[in-house]
Image (tube, rainbow, N blue to C red):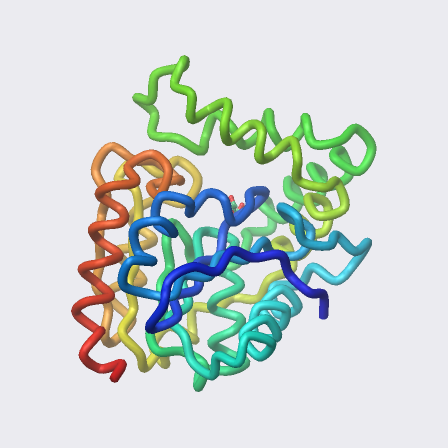
Amino acid sequence: MVRLNFSDSGQGTPVVLLHGFPLSGVIWMPQQRLLSDQYRVITPDLRGHGRSPAPAAGYEMETLAEDVLALLDDLGIPKAVIMGHSMGGYVTLAAWKMAPERFLALGLLDSQAAPDTDEGRKTRNQLADQVAKEGSAAVEAAMLPKLFAPNLDAKDPLIGQVRQIIKTTPRAGIVGALHGMAQRPDASAILAAIAVPTLILTGDGDQLIAPARATAMAAVVANAMLAVIPNAGHLPMMEQPAATTTTLLSFLSTVGNGFA
Ligand code: MLT
């Protein structure tokens, strides 16, 4: 277990937002600001990302989930709404598998339950080797063009912001998380067992995890709300912050009565 860096603002029902790879809690800045009027919003940096420690090993999704649950223990929070973006969603599903009693509600944003294909695993492990040798430029080149909706203006400042986050992600974190994601188990069977309200959200132009994955998951989870954010790719919280925040607020208010 490592002690995670995190932001914590607002009061009320705790809402934990987990970022994807190879990013950090700052991707949630607009949501942190607006949701914290009504909720206690906690945005950790997962291990190896942002300003959290980056050990040389220990990047299984289960280990990342243990760090998050340990953070909740440290904060004295028995139950929270836990939502994850992309890799953060893999961590959320791992946390649900280990400790479903810690969830008030769950969210999967531009994420999936399926594991890597054999081909995908091979490509990921090759990329990890390349980053280990040459640094984060390889992952930046592989991911940056696919993170946004296809029609995003090439001069949009968002591209530079995200590039900067990737550049500051420690090399050990990038390599570790690539290996961790490559070996993550198939979580599809977990979906039907999710017993809390669940938000499944995707950008309509996600080029990394096809929106059809979100539709398929929403069909299996018993108490799911499916939201498709228009004009967004893999990062709707940054590309369309207002629409994403409104959707999160609407989900939280729907399930809110059950929290008291
Ligand atoms: C992420 O955004 O966290 C990653 O793209 C997820 C993945 O590569 O499977």
Most extreme residue toward the top is 155
Q: Residue at x 34, y 58 (%)?
A: 36
In the rendered structure, the answer to whether residue 50 lies left or right of residue 81 reads right
Question: Image quarter for residue 191?
Answer: bottom left
Does 153 appear above or below 117? above
Question: Image quarter for residue 64?
Answer: bottom right
Q: Is residue 114 visible?
A: no
In the image shown, does 215 or 234 lie closer to the viewer?
A: 234
Q: Residue at x 57, y 79 (%)?
A: 73
Q: Quadrant of the N terminus?
A: bottom right
Residue 141 rendering spot, x and y as whole percentages:
59, 25
Residue 120 rendering spot, x and y as whole percentages:
58, 45
Q: Residue at x 49, y 57 (%)?
A: 43
Does 14 appear above or below 101? above
Residue 34 rendering spot, x and y as whole percentages:
30, 50
Q: How many marks?
A: 0
Residue 50 rendering spot, x and y as whole percentages:
62, 46
Q: Residue at x 37, y 59 (%)?
A: 108
